[in-house]
Image: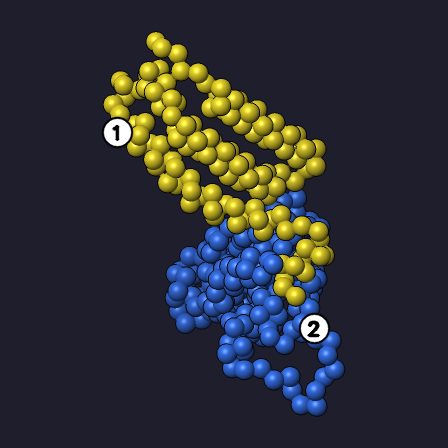
Chain colours: A blue, B yellow
Amino acid sequence: MQVTCKIRRYNPTVDEKPYFSVYRAEVEPTDRVLDVLNTIKWYEDGTLTYRRSCAHGVCGSDAMRINGRNRLACKVLVRDVGNRMTIEPMMGFKVLRDLVVDMEPFFEKYKAVKPYLINDEPAPVTERLQSPEDRAKYDDTTKCILCAACTTSCPPFWSNPDFVGPAALVNAHRFIFDSRDQRGADRAAIISDRDGVWRCRTVFNCTDACPRGIQVTNAMEEVKRKLLYDRA
Amino acid sequence: MSLARQAVEKRGTNFELWSWYYFRISGVLLLFLALGHVYVMHIATPIEEVNYAFVAARYATPFWRTYDALLLLLAMSHGVNGMRLILHDYIRARSWRVFAFSVLYSAALIFTVLGVLVILTFQPQPS
C-alpha cells in the first residue's frame, strides 16, 4: 500500500524554523511506522534524522508524535494509523534535528529522584528477601523503558518544563513502594516540591502514551496518597 | 520515618501537599453549598421576589450569614489556590510572575475583606 507521510523537519544549522516535508512510500500494512521512516531515509531522503536502536519496543529510542499521539515508531503498525500519517518530534524538549530531541533535561529529572535502591544495612549473604505481595506493589512501575513518551505528552509539563514529569515519578514510585528501600528523604523532597507530583492534573495522556502499558496516572496518584497518609 | 515527614525535614514545609488536599475537601463542600445557594436564590424563590426585603429577611438569621461567609471564604480560597497554580504553570518570566501574583493576591484580599465586611455588618433596614 502507498502511504503519505508528513514529517516535521528542522536542521538548526540551516533552517530558520521547522517545516513539514511530505513523502510517499510503498509499504506493507503490517510494516511498522519505523519501516516507513527507514524506507524514506534509505531510498528517498538520506538527510531525514531520527533515533532508533533495538527497533523492537524495548530500548525506547524511537518515541515520537504519530498523528498527534506519542508512540514508539517500532510498535505501531501502518494498518493501525492508516495511509496518511503525520510524524513530529516529542513536544517539550529542544529539537536537535528533525525527530531527535535533547533528552538531557529528561534524564536529569530521572536522576534527581534517585532511581536506585538505598539501603544502608550491610548486604546479607544471600538476597534481600521480599514477599510476593510486597513485590507486587511496584510491579507495574518496573516496566519503564525511559522513552519519555509520557512526560512529553503531559500538558502541565508542556507549560511548565520544571515539572518533574510522569517518567521520573514512575521511577520514584518504583523505589518508594519497594519494601527493601530505606531512605526516601531526597526522593520525597523532589517529588513533594512545588514542581513535583502535585503538578499532576490527572490528564491521563501519559497513561495513553506509555508503550509499556504502565498505569502512569495511577502510579502518581499512589505517590500522592502515600505522601498524604504518611504525613504524620 | 514516613515520606512526607522526611520531605518536611528536607524542605521545611508540606505546603503543596496541604494545598492539594484542601482542593479536594473545599471542592466537595463547595459543591453542596453552591447547589444549595442556587436552589434557594434561583429555584425555590421566583426571581421577582428576590429583592431587598428578601435579603434582609435572610440576613436576620445567623444561619444564612454563616452559610454565605462559608461560601465566600471557601470559594475565594479554592479559586485563588487554583489561579496560583495556573499562573505558576504558565507565566515563566520572573517580572510577569511578580506582577500576576500581586494582582491575584490583592484582588483576593480586597474581595474577601469587602465580602466579610458586608456579611458581618449588614443591618436590615425596614423598607
**Which is nearer the eye, A41 or B96?**
B96
Camera-nearest label, 2 or 1: 1
**Residue A193 in the figure: left or right of residue B86:** right
Q: Provide the chain ID for the residue under circle 1.
A: B
Q: Which residue sits at x=37%, y=18%?
A: B56
Q: Which residue sits at x=34%, y=37%?
A: B35
Q: Quick one: SS at disc 1? A: loop
**Could you say where residue A166 lies in the image, as x and y percent from the top left?**
57, 59
Q: Against A145, is B30 above or below?
A: above
Q: Which residue sits at x=26%, y=29%?
A: B44
**Could you say where residue B109 lies in the image, as x and y percent from the top left?**
58, 28
Callout 2 crowding tier (Cα within 10 Å): few <14, some 14–19, many ≥20: few
**Could you say where residue A141 lies in the image, as x and y percent from the top left?**
54, 70
**Residue B63 in the figure: left or right of residue A231:** left
Question: Amino acid type of disc 2?
Answer: Ile
Q: Which residue sits at x=48%, y=56%?
A: A205
**Numbered label attached to residue B2:** none
Q: Quick one: SS at disc 2? A: loop
What residue is shown with label 1?
Answer: B44
What residue is shown with label 2?
Answer: A118
Quarter of the image with the N terminus of chain A in it: bottom left
Instruction: Tell me if I can see residue A149 in this picture.
Output: no
**Which is nearer the eye, A74 or A229?**
A229
Q: CA distance from mark 2 to mark 1?
A: 62 Å
**Which is nearer the eye, A80 or A119?**
A119
**Residue B56 in the figure: left or right of residue A189:** left
